[in-house]
Amino acid sequence: MRLRESNIERLTQGTFDALVVGGGINGAVSAAALSGQGAKVALIDRGDFAGFTSQESSNLAWGGIKYLETWEFGLVRKLCMSRNRMMRHYPSRVREIRFLAVIDRGFRYHPAFLWMGTWLYWLIGNCFTRIPRLKSVSDIQAEEPILNVDGCAGGFEYSDAYLHDNDSRLVFNFIRSALNMGCVATNYVESLGARRGDDGTWRVQARDTIDGRSYEIRSKVLINAAGPFVDAHNRLTGQKTQHRHVLSKGIHLIVDKLTPNRRVLAFFADDGRLSFIIPLGVRTCIGSTDTRVESPVTHITDDDRAFVLDNINKRLKLPRPLTTDDIVAERCGVRPLAVRGESGRDTDWMLLSRKHVIEMNRPDAHISIFGGKLTDCINVGEEVSELVRQLGIAMPYWGQKWYGEPHPSIHEDFLHRARLLDLDRYTSPASSEPLSSRLWRRYGARALDLLEDIREDPRQAELLIKGTEYIRCEIKQAMHSEMIAKLEDFLRRRSKIALVARKNDIRNAPGLFEACEILFGDKAREKFDEYFRE
């Protein structure tokens, strides 16, 4: 918490070049891009970083193959290039994964026609991934015996990408990158609105949602990256925009691992909505629904669960049907879809794409970011930094690369030191990868600090929270550098423990309270009880 307190104090000192409101993926990449190119940047979020929409994704970085059906070839090309760039510059975090799509007899397109579409998709994506394959019913049955092929006309296989860790961890790594470049970022600080003074400076009234303190933040440029709350915050600041959001609710249910194969299974549900079965470490993620809603705050209903479970049970051959008792955890969030003016009221909103739109009010030095998805995040960062530069903000490192994993030489240095320590002998028996791979992927160059901790005290490499992969020195680093204010921040967003373990199992996990003591000191019991009470 010392880092957070220090940053809160710095928020009130001087005038920033840009203040970003919202710590989801759009806000995180905006802050990382601007900080990485030399701007003086601040970022606030009224909850935790990635604590809303950006923690409820499918963990996929995909090029938008479904937008071929609506002839949005330019958008598909842009998303594929973004996906390729993510895979190229984050090779340990964003990796290729195969999708096996199963088509029922009587579907509106024949599997062979859809397979031809995957070739077009592959070509549009510069042939960056493995080639598509047409699959017969017998192929599908042999490769995925769990699938119920009764009524199946065939299928096809193609590639996209997935996030090895969870979506919110990706967002936090962009926040961490911004912090490393001097950004003053704080969670649990809410913008109550802003006005622009006669001197051209924005004055944002902010409130600490933990202790209620209020203060003013000054900035030359204001960037609204509040996700589904962009429209509401624009009303607070008197901004009128050409675009707005319509909202779609998506849900995912986490269950025990259904298939040992690391591929995504895709099918069309009874009502035509696209659904996935996605590997998630020791678990499987199933979903999702796609339901129009009016409020950004949503909940999973009994009907939502029944819809997903019924469709999964119809398409899989399981020893017994999945029931609500099999649900380990749930995800539910809205997808903000950008529409122009009043369009979207009469449009088939299920055909709306997840493209982002960035609007700039030049006279007011105000930027609003609508829509978007994880795949396209680097483009968002680059576009925002270009607009801020057009507003006259000096960027001494303009054009400098602000994204990507550390230089390969740093990775080699890490691996060399890890071998000298024989680090991988501490790998948990239940882990799917060596400890050295996981530490590098999650922490990058900061993993070198973990090696130093282990060298000085080998106990730091011991598993701390039983039933998870987290070792003692990771918890210490999280306490120092990851701005964890609540236990949920660690269990749900800095890690994916709350996504793959039942809450009661987490409560009883040996070592969890010790982790709380490391994270929160004498407030450990308060934070522990707060999480399980909520």
Image (cartoon, grey):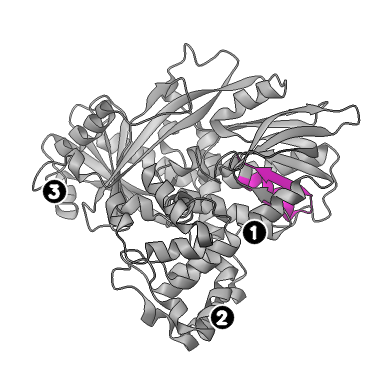
Looking at the image, can residue 280 be seen?
no
Marked residue nearer the N-terminal end (1 or 2): 1
Give the secondary structure at mark 1: helix
Marked residue nearer the N-terminal end (3 or 2): 3
Looking at the image, can residue 240 be seen?
yes
Give the secondary structure at mark 3: helix
The quarter holding residue 12 reads top right
Q: Position of residue 112 (x, y in %)?
A: 27, 38
* Residue type at the position of mark 1: Arg
Start-end of magenta stretch: 28-45
Q: What is the CA distance from the residue labelled 1 to the residue labelled 2?
A: 22 Å
Q: Is residue 303 above or below residue 507?
A: above
Q: Position of residue 210 (x, y in %)?
A: 58, 43
Q: For the residues carrying marks 1 and 2, which lies nearer the camera in this image?
A: 1
Q: Is residue 287 above or below residue 157?
A: above
Q: Image point 84% across, 54% down: which residue?
A: 396
* Residue type at the position of mark 3: Ser
